[in-house]
Image (cartoon, rainbow, N blue to C red):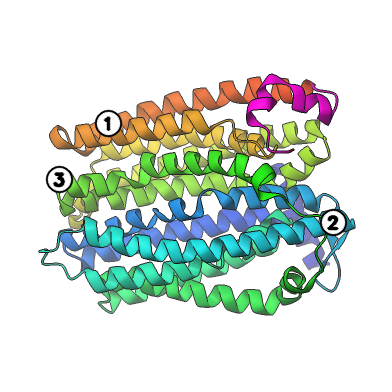
Amino acid sequence: MAVSAERQGLGRLMARVHTDRAGLFGVANVGTRMMCAALTAALVALCFSPELQGYYYTFASLLGLQVMAEMGFGQVVIQFAAHEWAHLRMTCGGVPAGEPAALSRLISLGRLAIAWYALAAIISSGGLIVAGLAFFPAASKISWRTPWIALGLVSGASLATAPMWLLLEGCNQVTEVYRFRLTESVLSGLGALVAIALGAGLWTPALAVTTKLFWNVAFLRRRYRKFFRCFIFQPSGPRTNWRYEIWPLQWRIALSWLSGYLAFNSLTPVLFHYRGPVIAGQTGMTLSLVVGVQQIAAAWALVKAPAMGVSIARRDYRAADRLAGRLIVSCTALSALAAGAAWLAICGLYAYRIPWAYRLLPPPTSGLFLLACIPAQAAFPLSVYLRAHKREPLMVPSLLAGLLIFASACYLSRAHGAGAIAASYMAITGVAAPLAIGTIWLRARRRWHRLPSPAAQLSSPLSASLRVGR
């Protein structure tokens, strides 16, 4: 009886905050990663020199170049799988079943994703190694070459497992996926902390990714072996057409994700190049807190992406609208609380003059980066909503925002440093971009949902330029 009462109480709490078990696992995962990032930052400040800290966080920023090999395929897989899963279900034996045509298209999508990411893993490993060898100074006193090459190799191998998780998430297995990711974050975070404490130095990122990779393979083999056997042995039938269905959406998302790299991950390497590893290390450590704030709000929305895709596929637009509204409120509140807590922590460290507090950017500069997270994450559910239609109308504003931030960072870093970059980032990411996303969402929703049938939908001017289907 006590256990039942506790479950009912938990159910009422989740209903009150408009989430479910997957949402709680997602937020717990991000909270765990934030805690690990904070502990890692503390150990880095204690165990690394300022120069080594700069290399450490620049490693993490350059690792984001994987987005160029992935080319936005991940978001496409989730949305297309969710549309097919609207006509399918998971059997007790752990295999997908339902409408034959939808099952065949899902299997075709899975095979395409596995092949794509296998090639992307090879390109990613080679590209990262070459980029690092070209970017970091050859005459540096820091021994970075071998750790960087190892990181490039293991991160490529980890990328090869990505399609499995994307398919599971698109097939609405979000509770299991986010429960696993919570455990994964704990293990990889502990691995990084132990590695730093034992003096691994720049080998720490490679060791953390290796821990994550082995845990991924072990879990997928144990829990979803039968599910993925279907993608190998199931006979072929109707297929997902990559050229006419996926590619028109994928290249738009790829450019949007590239703009995301330019808008955020490029800041630390730019400062490394123009201002040296010390200021780059301060920026990288501060931005790791900003990433945590962004992720804790984004996780709340991303766990609902498959459910939103199913609602759109069934043309249940009211359900999608209600879900989007609840997510906007939740993401705004979470990002405001997380950003406020992070900024107060930085202010406290500076106020008490704790020595390693100066490994972070000063409170005014950090505050600008953190403040930009609130409106940006408030608009994030709108982008999830739009992409649930298997369309990408945000390509142009995202690309413009990324290019503006990157260009302003390159210009401002020479004469003004991180403070001016933070102000520019706040103006573009915290003000201009959310306004653009909101405007596009209102216009696209009005045009897409007013159409009475798929045939009429394909004939609309907006759909003619953005459609992904035939």
Please tell me whether residue 47 is drawn above or below residue 214 in the rendered image.
Answer: above
State which region is magenta: 451-469
| Residue plotted at (47% across, 44% down) | 294
Sequence-wise first label, 2 or 1? 2
- Which of 227 and 299 lies nearest the eye of the viewer? 227
Identify the disc placed on residue 195. Answer: none
Provide residue 292's location: percent of width, then percent of height: 44, 50
Q: Give the residue at mark 2.
A: 88
For the residues marked 3 and 2, what is the alpha-carbon distance in whole angstroms? 54 Å
- Answer whether residue 13 is visible to the viewer in this image: no
Residue placed at 49% from the left, 29% from the top? Answer: 396
Q: Are marks 3 and 2 in contact (CB under 8 Å)?
A: no
Name the residue rendered at 54%, 44% in the picture: 297
- Residue at mark 1 to residue at mark 3: CA–CA distance: 15 Å
Residue 269, percent across and down? 26, 49
Quick one: SS at disc 2?
A: strand
Q: Residues within 10 Å of mark 1 (few under 14, many from 20)?
A: some
Q: Is residue 122 at all visible to an observer of this figure?
A: yes
Q: Which residue is mark 3?
A: 275
Residue drawn at 48 percent across, 65 percent down: 121
Q: Quadrant of the C terminus?
A: top right
Which residue is identified by label 1?
408
The image shows residue 238 at horizontal and vertical percentages of 81, 55
